[in-house]
Image (cartoon, rainbow, N blue to C red):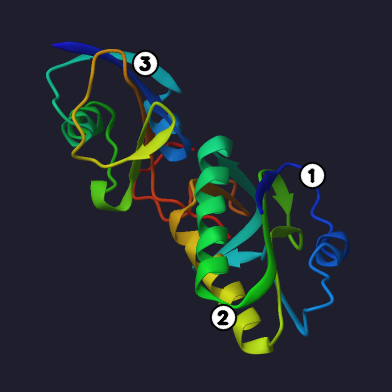
Amino acid sequence: MFKITSAVIDPAARKRELEQSAAGACVTFEGWVRNHNEGEAVQALEYEAHQAIAEKEGARIVAEAIERFAITAVHCEHRVGKLAIGDCAVWVGVSAAHRGAAFDACRYVIDETKARVPIWKKEHYASGTTGWVNCATKVAG
Amino acid sequence: MIEVTARYFAAFRERAGRDTERVHTQARTAADLYGELARRHGFADSMTRCKVAINDELADWNVALTAGDEVLFFPPVAGG
């Protein structure tokens, strides 16, 4: 399952949903808001998504992970809205019979999510300016 | 000429100063329309790094536009 959410992500609760008696491994990834990017001090982040298309594309990624890797469960959740330094912005969890598939599938889901899902990140810098990450289009202020 | 609705997200929305607009255009494809609107609003991102959705489905840039389409322009994504 893939979800866009404005609520705080609860890693412990999400992890419990991966539990299955056939699973011998669980790999989770948490993406946190850090205080710097490309040499600029970052004070806060804002994430925006097109929720319907993001969840549809995310569901495709999750389905691909199930198809490609021998896993028992997978979940990915991504925040939108304003986040503070240290907040969990994205969470991926995979359970599998063995660790190799769990590591590979977790990596696949986070990499594809970053590359394909319509989510955008606006950084608020200590200097008072803002910037949209990865975008060449510049906005005044 | 056809009329379509353009919708902008993230950097495109802020750059254009609006989230949606009606556009009368001779553009035949989403790619043509992006070129036209990028010139009008100063979008600097290469189309190959952006995505387009038509009527709420991700679409190919070369798909032909139809009158009444809602065309969503997505700047380069940055999840994670």
Q: Secondary structure at mark 2?
A: helix
Q: How many angstroms separate mark 1 from mark 3 (CA)? A: 31 Å
Q: Which residue is mark 3?
A: B21
| Relative side of B47 to B20, left or right | left
At a point 81% along the width and 50% down the height, the residue shown is: A8
| Relative side of A12 to B45, left or right | right
For mark 2, does the 10 Å Cα neighbourhood hold few (<14), some (14 to 19), or many (20 or more) residues?
A: some
Residue type at mark 2?
Answer: Asp
Look at the picture and state if B63 lies above or below A12.
above
Query: Of the numbered discs in the image, which one, if any, rests on residue A67?
Result: none
> What is the x, y in percent for residue B77?
45, 51
At a point 34% along the width and 50% down the height, the residue shown is: A136
For mark 3, does the 10 Å Cα neighbourhood hold few (<14), some (14 to 19), or many (20 or more) residues?
A: few
> What is the x, y in percent for residue B8?
41, 29
Q: How many angstroms separate mark 3 from mark 2 (CA)? A: 43 Å
* Label whose residue precedes the other's in the sequence (1 or 2): 1
Looking at the image, do the residues carrying marks 1 and 3 touch, with CB atoms under 8 Å apart?
no
Front-most of A113 and A48? A113
Residue type at mark 3?
Answer: Glu
Residue type at mark 1?
Answer: Ala
Query: Of the numbered discs in the image, which one, if any, rests on residue A7?
Result: 1
Q: In the rendered image, which quarter contains the N terminus of chain A?
A: bottom right
At a point 61% along the width and 46% down the height, the residue shown is: A47
The chain letter under disc 2 is A
> What is the x, y in percent for residue B67?
24, 13
Q: Which residue is mark 2?
A: A104
Nearer to us: label 1 or label 3: 1
The chain letter under disc 3 is B
Q: How many angstroms separate mark 1 from mark 2 (CA)? A: 28 Å
At a point 19% along the width and 12% down the height, the residue shown is: B2
Looking at the image, do the residues carrying marks 3 and 2 touch, with CB atoms under 8 Å apart?
no
